[in-house]
Amino acid sequence: MRTLIALPLVVVALASMGASPHPPKRVNYAGIAWEATIEGAKARAVKEGRPILHLQTFGKLDDPYSCTNTRTLRTVLLADPEFKKLLQNEVVPSWEMIREVPKVTIDFRNGQKVTRTLKGNVAMYLCEPDGRVIDAFGGVVTPKDFVPVIRDSIRHLAGKTHAEVSAFHRIRARAFQVAGLNAGKTVAEAPLLIAPSKPRSKQSTSQDPRRLEFEAAAAQLFDASAEPMPMSASIRLGTGKTDGTPAELGMLAVQNESRMNLTAVRGVIHRWLASFDKLPSPTSAKDDMFETILHVPYKDPYLGLFDVELPGTPNPKG
């Protein structure tokens, strides 16, 4: 069974902190100072003797129109007191924007407009002070699920050798089967899409059995938010329910998504991190994390949305 990876919308109204002509060295959000470059994080981590927790998002951390998963993550996880203590006392938090997220505005031609975002996702990397990734997490997670897991990773992986890190992930991978269903973001995004993007399959260029095992596992994941369906079907898919308040259904979808991200998706990530001869940096990890694991083609200017076929719509390519 292929596992769906997609997350729910939690609507949040946030005031922008304002643009600056020069990128800041740090971004302050929810009382936490996030290093705005991995180099700044590495320097601080060496000085403080802590690992780095590096966050990658689509859209800015404080932007009201950052991607669905960024908005959800900052509402559910970044505002949690226990997680904030971890950021303040146990790691050096850092953040980078992968790219801006697409926005779609529906003009009802009666003075009313609705604006939504499409695609995007989030990833977090636990790194050594020199920037090597020793663990990673894709998608939205809840504090209840995530805080014990990240503390377990810090305890077992911080300061360890490459061989010890690989062995940790190889052993943990055996405990996870890539199967199940999660589709929370579908609640927010699928009703806006008329047809799914055409899948882009690619042949592996690796002969390494570890890499082939990882790629085979990653192929079992796909993003359900790219599938067209009515709102009622997307709610059922993401929550297993057909009624409830928006807040209740939204939180249930987040909880379901969090569990799947720390089981099925986590199992793929364990296989991925066990496949390296040399551990990656967050920069070099982006392709695998977003394109191979989370199935977000972040380097495509259209994020995989250009080839959506809308009958009768002119093709801008001519």
Image (cartoon, rainbow, N blue to C red):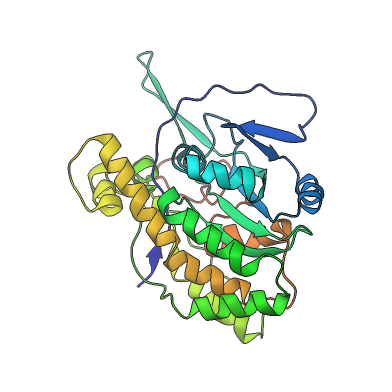
Residue found 47% across the figure and 81% down from its top: 174
As drawn, which residue projects farthest toward the left? 243
**Residue 51, placed above or below residue 246:** below
Q: Position of residue 245 (x, y in %)?
A: 22, 35
The residue lying toward the viewer, choosing from 302 and 23, is 23
In which quadrant will I find the N terminus? bottom left
Quadrant for residue 269, please give it.
bottom right
The residue lying toward the viewer, choosing from 269 and 316, is 269
Number of numbered callouts drawn: 0
The residue lying toward the viewer, choosing from 165 and 97, is 165
**Residue 120, placed above or below residue 2:** above
In which quadrant will I find the C terminus? top right
Q: Position of residue 102 (x, y in %)?
A: 54, 38
Q: Decide if residue 152 is in sight here.
A: yes
Residue found 61% across the figure and 80% down from its top: 167
Q: Position of residue 243 (x, y in %)?
A: 17, 42
Quadrant for residue 263, please give it.
bottom left
